[in-house]
Amino acid sequence: MKRSSGFPWKRARRVTPAETEAFRRAIEESTGKPRAPRGRPPKPEEERHRATSIRLHPRVLAWARREAAKRGIGYQTVINQTLLKMS
């Protein structure tokens, strides 16, 4: 069962980018500190990954997933790191 928060969602509207910028400036003025940038910084072009599709033997995938679980990273990262070592 869903509980009601009491907030009038039907009357709510989205905040515009201009309003967001005004809020950011107001916070910076009241605290005297600039807000830290949000999100992940963009990578240089030569470091960006390209989407691709590749067929791999099931044993290769099983190995990559086991390695990923041991290292606490994603299996695609394991495959990418292994291929980069070979180049």
Image (cartoon, rainbow, N blue to C red):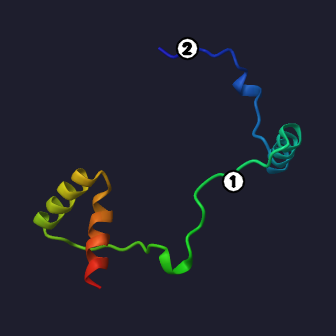
Image x and y of residue 13, in percent: 77, 35
Image x and y of residue 25, in percent: 86, 46
Disc number placed over residue 37 in the picture, else none: 1
Pick the residue in front: 9 or 78. 78
Is 62 placed left or right of 53 in the picture?
left
What's the residue type where badge 2 is placed?
Answer: Arg
Pick the residue in front: 57 or 6. 57
Mark 2 is surrounded, within 10 Å at the Cα level, by few (under 14), some (14 to 19) or many (20 or more) other residues, namely few
* Residue closest to the far left: 59
Is 2 placed left or right of 18 in the picture?
left
Asked which quadrant contains residue 74, the reply is bottom left
Disc number placed over residue 2 in the picture, else none: none
Callout 2 touching callout 1 (CB < 8 Å): no
The answer to whether residue 69 is above or below residue 55 is above
Q: What element does badge 1 sit on? A: loop
Mark 2 or mark 1, earlier in chain: 2
The answer to whether residue 62 is above or below residue 5 is below
Mark 1 is surrounded, within 10 Å at the Cα level, by few (under 14), some (14 to 19) or many (20 or more) other residues, namely few
Image x and y of residue 33, in percent: 81, 45
* Residue in the image at 29% along x and 85% along y: 87
The answer to whether residue 8 is above or below residue 52 is above
What residue is disc 2 on? 3
Q: Nearer the viewer, mark 2 or mark 1?
A: 1
Asked which quadrant contains residue 82, the reply is bottom left
